Image (cartoon, rainbow, N blue to C red):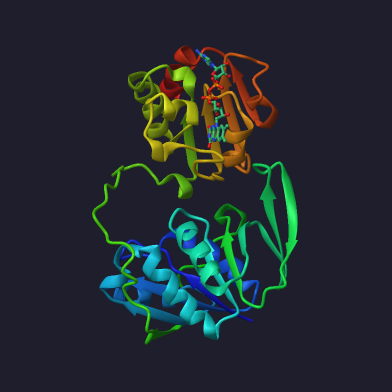
């Protein structure tokens, strides 16, 4: 079985989520990659070094800059003439491209897989991760998105793929144009790849208090900063901090939940973390049911104390 993995990149480097998707794809058979973008020679070279990769198809041109899904999807659909499965990480952009590919191929998408049981059989979470469904497809061409936290990263070095320019007809579909982007810059590790995350909840009470308490603790731990949806909705933390069902799915080594109750929608985004530490003044808060370590206390007292002791 030949699988085509969409390479997520920032124009110069391959994003980590791609490496998890490669591991998932390798369970299906031969792995080919697609690097689409403008001026992506360096990305293609890096992609060819990923362990276990065969061919790296490179579509280099203006229509593929900024990963506009309306242009990338027809390109993938064309390349699927020579592949049996398309795999993308279930990231914001991956989830934008894959359904369009499925529609163009007139097949069902298999979303957010957790494991590959057989060539046609996969597991995936349902009901916000409260149940795991085993799904089987009879489609000849498979379109799959991968929950990155469920698969180890493939080694970024050690492969010797061959780079090949794509001679596809697909170009600018004329459906969308790139207007601009605002990228939040942070010296802290990115949430989905951070080894340690400190998240704050509604209990922080204001944006000032959120940053005054959560940021120093995160800095001491070299951690990424996350937030509950309540904290984001109240404006205490930016949108891209949100962890959960409608936010980011994370699985760091250590997840520190500060003043977060542990609603199922929040747990859906972080309960696979290796060690969960909860700080909450309510000893009956549901977060303590998933926590490995719990501290019952007033966060305004214990967080500064903890930060100082660290
Ligand atoms: P609360 O539930 O209000 O909890 C605050 C906690 O802080 C309480 O446990 C309280 O005991 C504790 N506390 C208060 N004061 C202190 C203090 N001084 N010291 C210590 N502890 C204190 N939520 C998400 O997080 N992510 C999602 O992706 C998400 N998606 C959703 C999708 C849908 C469709 C819906 C319906 C909801 C979603 N939610 C999501 C919202 C979710 O249901 C909860 O409302 C939210 O997670 C609550 O956030 P919180 O824990 O910060 O606030």
Is the C terminus in the top left, top right, bottom left or bottom right quadrant? top left
Q: Is 176 on the left-hand or right-hand side of 105?
A: left
Rendered view: 157 above or below 205: below
**Residue at (71% x, 68% y) in the render:** 137
Q: Position of residue 244 (x, y in %)?
A: 54, 38
Q: Residue at x 64, y 33 (%)?
A: 264
The answer, for residue 228, to whether it is visible in the render is: no
- Residue 236 point in image, percent of width and height: 38, 25
Position of residue 292 measured from the top left corner of the image (x, y, whole percent): 66, 32
Asked which quadrant contains residue 287, the reply is top right
Q: Quadrant of ligand 1?
A: top right
Q: Tell me: residue 301, above or below residue 180.
A: above
- Residue 85 visible? The answer is yes
Q: Is residue 208 above or below residue 38?
A: above
In front here: 301 or 208? 208
- Total numbered circles: 0
- Counting from the top left corner in percent of width and height, residue 2 is at 59, 81
In terms of depth relative to the viewer, which is nearer, 162 or 68? 68
Q: Is residue 255 above or below residue 126?
A: above
Seen at 46% across and 63% down, the residue is 97
- Name the quadrant of the N terminus: bottom right
């Amino acid at each position: 079985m030949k699988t085509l993995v969409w390479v997520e990149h920032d124009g110069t480097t391959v994003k980590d989520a791609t490496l998890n998707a490669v591991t998932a794809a390798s369970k299906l058979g031969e792995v080919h990659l697609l690097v689409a973008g403008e001026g992506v020679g360096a990305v293609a070279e890096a992609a060819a070094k990923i362990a276990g990769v065969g061919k790296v198809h490179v579509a280099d041109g203006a229509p593929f800059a900024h990963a506009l899904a309306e242009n990338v999807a027809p390109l993938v659909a064309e390349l699927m003439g020579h592949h049996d499965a398309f795999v993308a990480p279930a990231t914001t952009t991956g989830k934008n491209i894959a359904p369009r590919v499925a529609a163009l191929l007139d097949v069902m998408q298999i979303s957010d897989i957790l494991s590959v049981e057989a060539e046609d059989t996969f597991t995936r979470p349902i009901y916000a991760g409260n149940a795991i469904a085993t799904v089987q497809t009879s489609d000849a061409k498979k379109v799959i998105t991968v929950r990155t936290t469920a698969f180890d990263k493939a080694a970024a070095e050690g492969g010797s793929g061959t780079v090949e320019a794509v001679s596809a007809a697909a170009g600018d579909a004329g459906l969308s144009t790139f207007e601009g982007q605002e990228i939040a810059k942070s010296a802290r590790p990115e949430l989905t790849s951070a080894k340690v995350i400190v998240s704050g909840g509604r209990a922080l009470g204001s944006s000032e208090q959120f940053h005054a308490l959560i940021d120093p603790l995160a800095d001491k731990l070299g951690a990424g900063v996350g937030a509950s949806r309540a904290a984001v909705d109240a404006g205490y933390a930016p949108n891209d901090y949100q962890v959960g069902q409608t936010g980011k799915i994370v699985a760091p080594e250590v997840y520190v939940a500060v003043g977060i109750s542990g609603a199922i929608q929040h747990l859906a985004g972080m309960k696979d973390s290796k060690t969960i530490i909860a700080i909450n003044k309510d000893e009956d808060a549901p977060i303590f049911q998933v926590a490995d370590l719990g501290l019952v206390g007033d966060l305004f007292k214990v967080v500064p104390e903890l930060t100082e002791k660290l």
